[in-house]
Amino acid sequence: MYIYILVILAIILLYNKINNKKINVYDIILLFILILVCGLRDGVGTDYGLYKFYYNNIDQNSRFEIGFRFLIELANKVGMSYNTFLVLIATITITLFYVAIKKYSSKPAASIFFFVALGYYAYSFNIVRQMLAVAITLYGINYIKEKKFLKYLILILIASLFHSTALIMIPIYFLLKLKNNKKNNIILVFICIMLPFLYNTIFTFIVTNFEQYSAYATINDYTYTEPGIGTYVIGIVNFALFLLFTINKNKLYKLEDTNDIYLKMFSYSLLFTALSFENSIAARGGYYLSIYIIYLLPNIGICLFKKANKSFEILVIFFFILYYIVHIISFNEMLPYNSIL
């Protein structure tokens, strides 16, 4: 646990040094820490052993998308060890996230803090391919704003080379055209309420029609990951934040018009949150959308707590550090942390 505490403390200690748009030496130091903690892990993360097996036996796996297979085959050709490969993937993924945050966040240091505290950094230890795809899709914001669908489509297709679930971001482009008004929000909440009841139908359709997910199915039965207390906590927090953002959406839009896109993205992630109450794996599909909370939280802070005193800021930081600790303890076999060193 100590290594994860040191990571979050490093962000807090460097907070004022990294809270600007330009990459500086302090950003490099923090980025170096984030990459090494992720890349030098040994046996840490739910999928660590699975990825290690397929890295050493790539011909026995047809599930990996062509882009990720290419990276593995290239790494194998140059004689790269599995852990060296993990450092490479961590470098690509976390750097993409970090640069996107510096580019698009109004308060980069706060967004980096939330990126770690809300668990997205930890997800990079586990669903390796998908988090690389999520990092790539973050760069589609400009294409959405400028209504350049072809460039956006190319970006999403590139992301799908590493994890096919990135393709859900194509229909999202068109859903973003819907207005964020009371009527649509009521419809969204109603669908969220109904989705858990439709889970079996949805899951059966997916594993039956998409071969890469057939491994989640067995004869006459389907794999089932029962949600634990952590899944419900995250879900409740997300729905509460959606309510907070929606109530204050005019303030958010006034601060920055891109908040309209961020809020819609986060809103649609609730569909996957609702499904996760039936099967926790469903939450993974929403990471492409829920990740935008790391931009929204600093902005809502600017809107509502401009004159907040230091005591309140410390309380907020303490709450999210506690959330971070609970997440590390509860999810993805993050403990104990072991390093190849």
Image: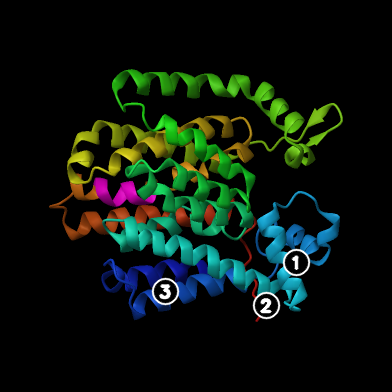
Q: Which residues are magenta?
A: 294-300
Structural crowding at the residue carrying mark 1, measured as other residues with C-alpha within 10 Å and reported as few (<14), some (14–19) or many (≥20): some
- The reply to whether the C-beta atoms of the residues labelled 2 and 1 are less than 8 Å apart is no
Q: Which mark is residue 30?
A: 3
Say what secondary structure mark 1 lies in.
helix
Given residues 95 and 223, the one toward you in this image is 95
Inter-mark Cα distance, 2 to 1: 22 Å
Q: How many marks?
A: 3
Q: Is residue 298 magenta?
A: yes
User: Which of the two discs, 1 and 3, sits closer to the camera?
Assistant: 1
Q: Disc 3 marks which amino acid?
A: Leu
Q: Disc 2 marks which amino acid?
A: Ile
Q: Does label 2 or label 1 sit earlier along the sequence?
A: 1
Which residue sits furthest front?
Answer: 150
Say what secondary structure mark 3 lies in.
helix
Residue depicted at x 53% and y 71%: 35
User: Which of the two discs, 3 and 2, sits closer to the camera?
Assistant: 3
Residue depicted at x 54% and y 58%: 122
Inter-mark Cα distance, 3 to 2: 20 Å
Q: Does label 1 or label 3 sit earlier along the sequence?
A: 3
Q: Does label 3 or label 2 sit earlier along the sequence?
A: 3
Given residues 177 and 149, the one toward you in this image is 149
Identify the residue under disc 2: 340
- The reply to whether the C-beta atoms of the residues labelled 3 and 2 are less than 8 Å apart is no
User: Which x, y percent locates residue 91?
Assistant: 54, 70
Q: Which mark is residue 73?
A: 1
